[in-house]
Image (cartoon, grey):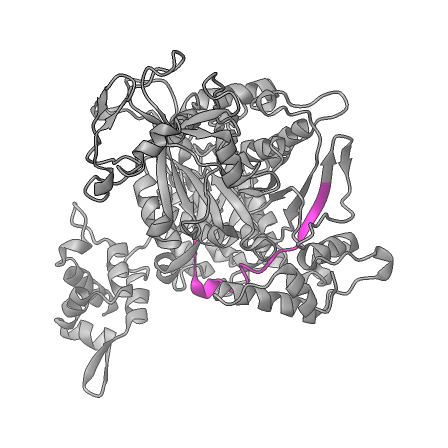
Amino acid sequence: MKNNFSKSLCALLKTEPRFVDESGELVKMAVVNSAWTSDSELIQLLLEDVNVREKFFYEIKGHKVFNQRLFVDYVADKNFFNSSYTRFRNKIGLNIDESFLRERGEVSLVWPYKDCVLEGGQTQEIERNRKEIFFNEILAHDEIDRLFDPKVLTNWKRYTKYGEWDVEEFKWNEDGILSENLIIKGNNLLSLHTIKQQFYGKVKLIYIDPPYNTGTDSFGYNDSFSHSSWLTFMKNRLEVARDLLRNDGLLFIHIGDQEMHYLKIVADEIFGRNNFVGTAPRKTRSGKSDVPYKLSQDFDWLLIYTRGASKKDRLFRRRVEQKYYKTPDFPNDEWRLSDLTKQTTIQERPHSNFTLINPKNGEKFEPNPNRSWAISVDTVKEYLKKGKIVFPGDYDFQNLTRPYMRVFKSEDLEKKGEDFDKAYVSTDFLNKAMDELLKDMTNKKGTDEIVELFGSKVFAYPKVELLLQRIIEYTTREGDIVLDFHLGSGTTCAVAHKMGRQYIGIEQMDYIESITVERLKRVVGTNEGHDVSGVSEDVGWQGGGDFVYCELMQYNAAWIDKIQAAQSSDELVEIWRDIAQNSFLNWYVNPEYPDNTEDDFIAVGKEKEGLEKQKRLLAELLDKNQLYVNLTEIDDEDFKVSEQDKILNHEFFTGEHLDPDDGLDLSEEFVGRLEESIDESNNGGKTISLKEAADNLGFKL
């Protein structure tokens, strides 16, 4: 009977063109999406059939109410999709509300395989005729319990020019803000939430070079890492990134044209369209002929946003290299050129609608209708008398085609003081700065720098140091905090270190130790020398400084590593048995090991990309709230957190340093208050400072 009803329902749904593919097969996901959005056309269609109406609708005071959950569960039933993969999921428990988990997912967690090749600046391995896999999973709201709680940090190390040292305490600035350079290994989304309270509204610059979702063989995903999943992946991270930015902070997203336009829509929603600063292209390679429609594919893009800067905030700085001239006609003061026009029309500034005449030769200069003179007809005589206007031909060393304003150095100093970085910047300078920012920034140059540093090409698409130098130079000052949570080879932090900026780098791949940390160790240097590649000479880098390395303390994430490393179905079966006894499983998963599922599991392994499907199945068993040890469980003996780690976590999250001899008790009250402060900021309430948080907890900084 049920089988007949299922066939009838399937036939009914197929009458709606949106729910079928080109071959006439039912597209389950389209039906589920429409159900979750209470699509009126779907509901009307279901009401037309008496049997369907009786099953999926109930009556309240004469009104038919759609039983949304029942309908979605039914469509997700094995009667619609019956394969070895589905049978295994049903038996083990993964298909309970599976459609809900897939279609209502709000958080994308991603674990790259160790040999995954990403175009977004990740690690490179020689490909041997096989497709790389990038495991991603979408979690729904009902699966997110303590996922975003701060995690215990472990494996602390400090690196200086004198070598590797144990971390005993942290450096704090006078405002109670942690002033360490941090390199964190762990899932970047969960790492961002872990540091959120410490650095809320403190970061001046975020630069990220995320995976581009190209769809090429060297960047494969399970389920093709669908467009919507990739956007969810980005959305989750950009939301917390926004919280970390200062109001006058800037976010630079390095992205390819495959997803750039879609990502901008998501970023506009998170940051607000008014906070979109601009888009800048970057040439990635010399021209090639292997492009469709003869259009160049030789560029990627920088999407630039601010958190909420007002017009008075200065987002971009410039180099202290303003060009001043010293000439005999003004022996007592140097001067520079400035634009003599404004970005207003002559209709908007009628007093600036006049012909400017060179008094020396009578040459006339008409106003630009769309860009009026910066002076008025009433003040032009005064400017001419003071020599404030420079005409073409006034000086042999200049090749001017129009008049310019003369600005004396004394005027700059009077207006802005000795801080030349706050001096006014001309349009000409900005054009020059943008040209410098984008030229000679190809991926090849970035690769050359890596080869110079490591002696081989260990990264597929490293970004050139000069690009990061320009971005950091134009947007930050010494001591400002720079964040990169797709750290890759470490270019961002390497350049930030050389330029005297505080930085935070986050990366979850194992190469963080062999490549990223190693690169920064060479930047810091030793008594025998330091990194001289990239921008070292340009910024006068002489080595020195230090940085702190730590990791999110793994629990279920360690099982993910084991799953990824497995090479056969037999290995995965053993891991499954181990997981059932020694890990946290999702609440809906059968905790027993059903022997009758083993045949289905092995059958999955024989399918196309079967091993990867098996890995995904086992990874889905694990409770993602327990990927890493939550800070609230730091005293749980099952997790075996060392006393030194407890001391360091206590200081990291409260600002109070404890002497080991004093003992340590991270009480439930302390953890509870910490969670309350985090919840307060997450829910849009008042964001308390570290000092205020410490006061609330009874600590004195």
Q: Is 109 or 339 nearer to us in this picture?
A: 339
96 with respect to 43 (left or right): right
Point out residue 616 in the picture as x, y percentages from the top left corner: 46, 48
Residue drawn where x is 36% and y is 62% of the image: 100
Query: Which quadrant is the N terminus positioned in?
Result: bottom left
Q: Is 654 or 41 nearer to us in this picture?
A: 654
Q: Quadrant of residue 133?
A: top left
Q: Is 416 or 472 nearer to us in this picture?
A: 416
Q: Is residue 55 visible?
A: yes
| Total marks placed | 0
Question: What span is colored magenta in the figure?
Answer: 138-157
Q: Given the current orientation, which residue lies at the most extreme right position?
A: 661
Query: Which quadrant is the C terminus positioned in?
Result: bottom right
Point out residue 432 in the picture as x, y percentages from the top left corner: 40, 26
Q: Quadrant of residue 141?
A: bottom left
Q: Is residue 350 magenta?
A: no
Q: Quadrant of residue 64?
A: bottom left
Q: Is residue 214 visible?
A: no
